[in-house]
Amino acid sequence: MAYQIPRGCQDVFGNESYKWQALEQTLRSFCYMYNYDEIRTPIFEHTEVFKRENDSSDMVNKEMYTFKLENSKTSLTLRPEGTAPVVRSYVENKLFAPEVQKPVKVYYIGSMFRYERPQAGRLREFHQLGVECFGSKNPATDVETIAMAYQLFNTLGIKDVTLHLNSLGNTESRLAYRQALIDYLTPIRESLSKDSQRRLDENPLRVLDSKEKEDKVAVENAPSILDYLDEESQAHFDEVRTMLDSLNIPYVIDTNMVRGLDYYNHTIFEFITTIDKSELTICAGGRYDSLVEYFGGPETAGFGFGLGLERLLLVLDKQGIELPVE
């Protein structure tokens, strides 16, 4: 029998492994420069770490590798993303304790697993750099973290990367907007794709970033979430924009950009480039001020991003950028 690698995975060896090492070394140096310490969490967690109550994301519904051991009722899941395990660790190890210096800033580099259709820059086992900052509601934290990614791309020499920016507001703002979006989409429900018809019932904001042609047409005239921000949310977003302007970091406001995971609030962002005439997101993140509390910790603000290493290496290759491989 000829054994083959599972679909959606890859072997890395030879010169390619040196590229990975060079990239990882650059990423670690950047995290150190921005005062992030490494954290390593298990490659699998209890399923409940990822499957939160009322979470209707595609990741939870379709993409997680979940299994039970024989003669065990315990359900375990290979980590599909890095933020939830880090928050679990933050709470379990009481990193919120008064004697721990704040904010707590950690980074990780490791494998993630999602069952989805493999394509260029998207595999079923993929690798991410993630950074998470706990304990600061200051909009300057949002900007510093965005600036970190922006400076990383400049240092690597990557060209034609655009920062997309949006705000999801606080809980009150988002609930008001959610209802407005339902009111707008319900009369045109039949024109939506099957997936978006399901999302309309479960998580209507996800209709906004659908890649299906009929959905893009349907949301062209959808209400903007920025029109539903309350005073607090608007002030936070204005400060973020003012500081980005002062740092000369260009951005575009993208009101159709949302998050597949339900715990985000206020600032969200993506860095997008174009590869072979297709848009490719190479970094995405945002603020999540209620997730620590959900995991049983005290009310703690959080902000972070995830960056796909396979996608980053793809962009470097397509743009002819060589890493300093020894």
Image (tube, rainbow, N blue to C red):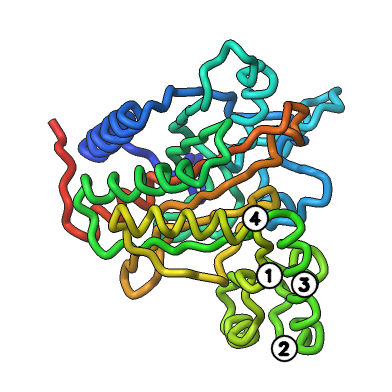
Measured in 3D between alpha carbons, the distance from the residue under mark 1 to the one under mark 3, in whole angstroms, is: 19 Å
Disc 1 vs disc 3: Cβ atoms closer than 8 Å? no
x%, y% of residue 314? 31, 54
Q: Quadrant of residue 137?
A: top right
Residue 193 vs residue 308: left or right?
A: right
- Judging depth in this view, the residue of 121 and 70 nearest the camera is 121
How crowded is the residue under tag 3: few (<14 C-alpha within 10 Å), some, or many (20+)? many
Q: Would you name the residue on which mark 1 appears?
A: 228
Residue shown at the point (28%, 58%) measured from the top left = 248
Q: Mark 3 or mark 2: which is in front? A: 3
Disc 4 vs disc 1: Cβ atoms closer than 8 Å? no
Q: Would you name the residue on which mark 3 appears?
A: 200
Q: Would you name the residue on which mark 2 appears?
A: 191
Q: Amino acid at mark 2?
A: Ser
Image quarter hosting the C terminus: top left
Residue 106 vs residue 316: left or right?
A: right
